[in-house]
Amino acid sequence: LPMASTTKIMTALVAIERENLNKKFKVDPRAVGVEGSSAYLRAGEEFTLRELLYALMLRSANDAAEAIAYAVAGSIEEFAFLMNEKATLIGLCDTHFTNPHGLDDDEHYTTALELAKITAAALEYPEFCEIVSTKTKRVEKEGFTRLFANHNKMLSRYDGCIGVKTGYTQKSGRCLVSAAERNGIRLIAVTLSCPDDWREHEKMLDFGFSQLERVTVVSKNEFMRSAIVKDGVTSSVKLGIDSDITIIKKNTDDLPKIDIDIPQILNAPVELGDAVGKIRLTYPDGHIEEFDVIALENVKKAKKKGLFGLFG
């Protein structure tokens, strides 16, 4: 389906990955006067990429989308190529981009699931999270102030909402991507062509949070083992994990089976932080996750005594 301005999630992701957000760019004349939502950019105006991203994600400015495309890739076509390249790297097969803003094009489409995957990738970047969770942003240029107000009402309507993006054209209908965090759980909801999207997202997110729980299955402070060290200045070394092992599971699912695989004897030298074993979690569906068991201290190799050591 078409996804309108939710396209701009990928636009922002590509820009963040490829350019310094503090780098300044002059607005390309070709980006001025693009139809639809606009930041009313003027040819030759200078903005940082970060400022253009605020215009893109809050104001949903189509001229900012094209200004970013020209700044990062030199042309709309080349930037769309980068968007499609990123989609392939994420593993998407039902998504295709022809522009950075989401204006209607028969070859510009995605699915709800794949748009969620794009959003998950973007939310890995703190800069993206900061921008899409901002309700208003002032950008001042040569005494002229632009105020960008976020179109995403979920930021005010839903407790824990952290973004992400609205979209609309007559062809696509109302499109919305939202994300929320509660009790260490982050959920992403997507609707395409949904007339009552605000309420539908509230219901979907409520459902998701009601079905999931975050559980610490192995605590860093409680997991402590030791191993014998052969030829070391000390005879043993403390082993542990560098952080709690926490999972998100359905309320009705059993906890994973935990197996610990660590050697009884290690050869010196042993360095702090060396991975020496594994903790393996096996889930009810057969899925397996592994975590490193590490050395919590250094153990140097003992010096062998020579003849001088024996008689000197």
Image (spheres, rainbow, N blue to C red):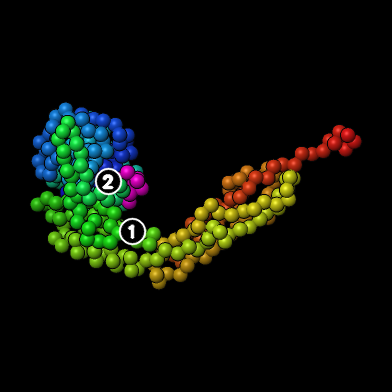
Q: Secondary structure at mark 2?
A: helix
Quarter location, residue 264: bottom right
110 or 232: nearer the eye?
232
Q: Tell me which amino acid carries mark 2.
A: Ile
Q: Position of residue 279 (x, y in %)?
A: 55, 57
Q: Position of residue 285 (x, y in %)?
A: 44, 65
> On the picture, is 216 further left or further right than 206?
right
Q: Can residue 273 be spotted in the picture?
A: yes
Which residue is at the far bottom? 252
Which residue is at the far right? 311
Numbered range of the magenta stretch: 120-128
Secondary structure mostly seen in the magenta stretch? helix
Crowding near the residue tagged with mark 2, few <14, some 14–19, many ≥20 C-alpha atoms within 10 Å: many
Q: Secondary structure at mark 1?
A: strand
Q: Position of residue 307 (x, y in %)?
A: 87, 34
Q: Which residue is depicted at the point 35% across and 45% down?
A: 125
> On the picture, is 206 further left or further right than 309?
left
Q: Which mark is residue 131?
A: 2
Q: Position of residue 205 (x, y in %)?
A: 28, 63
**Which image quarter is the C terminus in?**
top right
Query: In the image, is residue 140 part of the stretch drawn in magenta?
Result: no
For marks 2 and 1, the one nearer the N-term is 2
Label 2 to label 1: alpha-carbon separation: 16 Å
> On the picture, is 122 further left or further right than 283?
left
Quarter location, residue 60: top left
Above-or-below relation of 61 to 111: above
Residue corresponding to mark 1: 181
Q: Which residue is depicted at the point 52% across and 61% down?
A: 218
Crowding near the residue tagged with mark 1, few <14, some 14–19, many ≥20 C-alpha atoms within 10 Å: some
Q: How many marks?
A: 2
